[in-house]
Amino acid sequence: MTDMSLRLPTTRFRAVLNLGPRRAAQLPLPTRLGKPNLFAEFDDETTQSMLFVGYETGQLHLETTSTGIEYHFHLGNGDDSERSPWLPGDTSLLIAWATQLLADFHERMPDLLDDIDEAADWHESGFDLYVCEVEEPTKLDLIEVDIEGELLTLPWLGSGRVEHEHTEGGDHDDDHPIALLWNEQHDADPDTAIAEAWLDPRTEQPVTRALPDVDWTRVGWPEDEVLAWLEGIYVNHHLLPDAAGTILLGALERLGGIDGTD
């Protein structure tokens, strides 16, 4: 079990961003559903934006297309659904709000995500304030977020180099599995999988295991210590929200008027 007390402190970070006119913030949300969980992304190749609006009772997924914005529903267990999991009145309000939120987000792509990535870099460098650049006088928004500290981990103490990557086609495809890749040569790309980690859906804690036929003497670090190290890496990179994701969530909530400031 990972010792979560060995974490850097949570820090308050402020980012001044150009969010645009924030039209979705003027629209109502169905109050009985509570505050939604939000996530959005932008595909540089297709220039499409996606928005995910989640509640315990279901999810609404939206994406931009060449003709506008399309959406579909998921049930509370994640299964696709042709029908909304909510009452008709609530569904109408939610679709109108989420459609406008995605339109507002897409209008600022890709500049807003570039600013958020830059703000995250400033946080990693130890700063607590980032202000985006603008070419002319523009209304800006101050986003304040608490960014969780990472788990303190050692550097790789074995031989050669290691990397970790997502895996597919195994027994834990639905549990966010990763593989630890290793190469004995420092100047070569890691290409030999020596261990795996995934998220136990029952405990929501990472699980690790060593792969068979690994020569741990050549690896240069005992198997049990490598697995403990991999567990910490999994927590930092796949469990704890990163700075960019936290700032993005703050920006989405401000765009949608649900951050408590309007």
Image (tube, grey):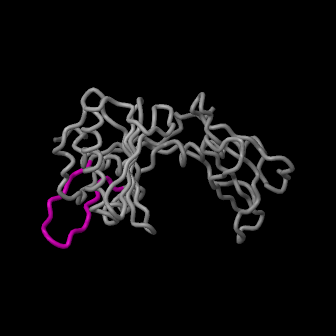
Magenta span contains residue 157? no
Quadrant housing the C terminus: top left
- Percent across and percent down for residue 130 are 29, 58
Image position of 156 (left or right of 6): right
In the rendered image, the quadrant that contains the N terminus is top right
Magenta stretch prevailing secondary structure: loop
- Residue at x 33% of width, y 55% of height: 69
Q: Along the horizontal axis of the image, is 121 left or right of 190?
A: left
Q: Is residue 89 above or below residue 97?
A: above
Q: In this image, 199 relative to 102: left or right? A: right
Asked if residue 136 lies in the magenta stretch, the reply is yes
The single residue placed furthest to the front in the displayed view is 82
User: Where does the image place residue 172, in percent across and percent down from the top left?
Assistant: 67, 41
Residue under the point 39% across and 38% down: 54
> In which quadrant of the rendered view does residue 171 lie?
top right
**Which residues are the magenta region?**
127-143
Nearest to the observer: residue 227 or residue 195: 195
Residue for point 39% across, 62% down: 48
- Determine whether 223 is above or below 135 in the image: above
